[in-house]
Every structure is written in structure tokens, then in C-alpha cells.
Image: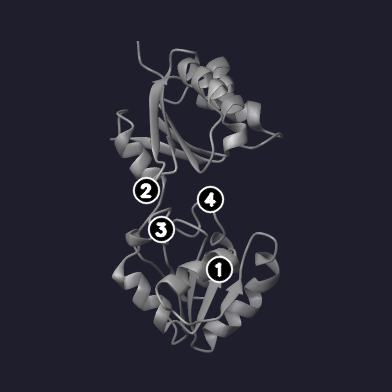
Amino acid sequence: MSNSGKLILVPTPIGNLEDITLRAITVLREADIILAEDTRVSSRLLNHFEIEKKLSPHHKFNEHKTVNSLILKLQQGNIIAMISDAGTPGISDPGFLLTRACVENDIEVECLPGATALIPALAVSGLPTEKFVFEGFLPQKKGRQTRLILLSEERRTMVFYESPHRLVKCLLQFTEFFGGDRRACVCRELSKIYEEKKRGTVTELSEYYTANPPKGEIVIVVEGKLTK
């Protein structure tokens, strides 16, 4: 590595603020620059832990434009910490572009261990965990059906992120492409006061959430295709 600065990816709590690590707090206090997906959301986190640092916005709408200037700051020796609204940067959140640019420019990148929604959801689902595939958010329109057809043959447990207003539509599509008897678990608001874990077939879950419209952050865990 060169004698440049360092990019540190810092996971932040997905709900309960006590889930942040002591190391993450130390990094945020000592960093020269903190990049935040939404400065309003992250300001509440920093205020809670009495971290007095200015936040610089870094999100999907400006990350392409800011990468070169951030690489320059890193080459000048700055330590940059990156946080997203919740969870680990780069996992269905901004972070990949800057990380790739750092790798291409021989700048050190470090990622702290910490909160992410997919692992707790997988662990409590009751579905096989020895092998799984993380799909994140499915394409909303173009390519969605093609992806679902491909995943209908997937034998590993699958983990998806979904928004509450699209959950029922997603579960109905799982019924169509995977079969209504495919087992699944919907985890909602993990680590928060209204945390909910609902297990059943995708048909049962689509019926439940049609009658009980959900709110909050959602992870769906679906079993893979069973071998005959």
C-alpha cells in the first residue's frame, strides 16, 4: 500500500443504537472526514454518542461525481469513515464505487464488523443457513421476471430486501415463480421495538400481509428449491 490515507467502512445500527460497537464510535470520533448517506439520519446517531463532526453527503445521486475528489483527499493522507443510514456501507447501500476506486488507486480499505440486517434474519428464519445467496432488492421492473425465473431453480436459501409497500406483490410473485408451498420468513423492523418475525409458506405470508399491511424495514428469507 502507498502512504496515503484510509477508507473505513463503518456499520451503523439497523435499529437499536446500542448495537454500535465501541470501535465504530472511536473511528467516527477520530476520522478526518465522515461520509453519510443521509446527513439528517446520521446526525441523530452522532448526536446520540456526542460525536461532534461535520458530515459530508455521499449517496447514490452524487457518488459518481465525488469519487475523484475523495480519492484525492485520501491520497493527501486523510482518514475517511463512511456510514450509511443503517447497516454496512456497500451492502445494498452506497459504498461500492468509492471502495473500488480505492482498490484501483492502491488506497487501503478497512471494513469494521457490525450490524447488517441479512444475517440476523437468516439466523432466525428456521431455514437452512449453511449455504445461502443474498439477492438484496430485486429489479423493480426491467429484468425482474428474468431474475425470478432464474431463482426458481436456486437450491440455496435466498435472502431479499423489500420495501413495505411492495412486500405483498413480491410474495405473490414468489408464489407464482417458486410455488405457493415454498417456506419463507418475513423479518420486519429487526432490533427495533416493533420487531416481527412471521414464518410460513409464501402463500400464507402473502395472505397475512394483505390483511395486515406492513410498515418498516423488511428482510425476506426464502428456502431454496428442494431436491427430489
Q: Quick check: marks 4 and 1 in contact, CB under 8 Å?
A: no
Amino acid type, residue under disc 2 in the picture: Ser
**What is the secondary structure assignment of the residue under circle 4?**
loop
Q: From the viewer's perspective, is the residue at label 4 or at label 1 nearer?
A: 1
Q: In the drawing, does residue 35 fall left or right of residue 228? A: right
Residue for badge 4: 92
Q: Which mark is residue 13?
A: 3
x and y, in percent, of residue 200 in the image:
39, 20
User: What kind of element bears circle 1?
Assistant: strand
Residue found 43% across the figure and 53% down from its top: 14
- From the viewer's perspective, is residue 115 above or below residue 161? below
Q: Earlier in the sequence, mark 2 or mark 3?
A: 3
Q: CA distance from mark 4 to mark 1?
A: 14 Å
Circle 4: residue type? Ser
Q: Nearer the viewer, residue 21 or 155?
A: 21
Which corner quadrant holds the N terminus?
Answer: bottom left
Residue 140, x across and y down, in percent: 67, 36
* Residue positioned most to the top: 228
**Contact (Cβ within 8 Å) of mark 2 with mark 3:** yes
> Can you identify the residue that label 1 sits on?
36
Label placed on residue 191: 2
Please say if 4 is above or below 177: below
